[in-house]
Image (cartoon, rainbow, N blue to C red):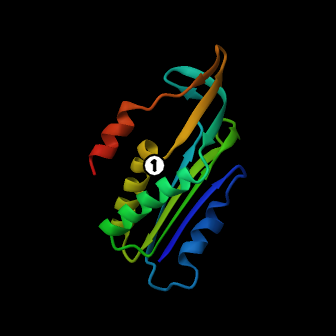
Amino acid sequence: MIKQIGIQTAPFDTAAEMLQLSDANASVGAIVTFIGLMRDINQGEAVNSMTLEHYPGMTEKALEKILDEAESRWDLLGMRVVHRVGALKPQDPIVMVAVASAHRGEAFQACEFIIDYLKTRAPFWKKEQTAAGVQWVDARQTDSEAERRW
């Protein structure tokens, strides 16, 4: 099974990333993909830009644990997570989660599980630039609630 993690500053090519999951594997019957974009508003306040920071090494290990957990729960053929760091502007893609399986149900569930866990367990820090200045973004209660479903 393919399990790949990428942490990068450059934009990613969603089609190319998905192709890695299905290329040369005729058993793949479904690929479910989630793309997270930077919004221009957070909790009612306009956001001009954002900087995403991470702890190299620790971040990849945390993502590996999340993918290992998904692999233990569902019959999957491949998983790919790409997360950007550095400076971002509104509408820039931030994260891609792609999951391949023989059937769509498992791919949908695993993809949702991975993004829910990623939002709460992966060590990324967001700093937003607003008209009022720079501010760090706190964890959201809704993300913790989504994680508890699993």
In this view, the residue in front, 8 or 64, is 64
Location of residue 17 (image quadrant): bottom right
Location of residue 49 (image quadrant): top right
Compared across the picture, whether 38 is left or right of 149 comes to: right
- Looking at numbered disc 1 in the image, what kind of residue is underneath it? Leu
Number of numbered discs present? 1
Locate residue 18, reporting x and y percent: 57, 68
In the depicted structure, whether residue 65 falls above or below residue 79: above
Kind of element beneath mark 1: helix
Locate residue 84, reporting x and y percent: 63, 48
Compared across the picture, whether 145 is left or right of 129 comes to: left
Locate residue 82, reporting x and y percent: 59, 57
> Of all residues shown, which one is farthest toward the left?
149
Q: Residue at x 67, y 60 (%)?
A: 13
In this view, the residue in front, 9 or 18, is 9
In the depicted structure, whether residue 60 falls above or below residue 102: above
In this view, the residue in front, 67 or 129, is 67
Q: Residue at x 54, y 73 (%)?
A: 21
In the depicted structure, whether residue 81 falls above or below residue 58: below
> Of all residues shown, which one is farthest toward the top?
132
In the depicted structure, whether residue 138 falls above or below residue 56: above
Q: Residue at x 55, y 42 (%)?
A: 124
- The residue under label 1 is 118
Badge 1 crowding class, 10 Å Cα cut-off, few under 14, some 14 to 19, many 20 or more, is many
Locate residue 98, reporting x and y percent: 50, 62
Q: Residue at x 39, y 73 (%)?
A: 76
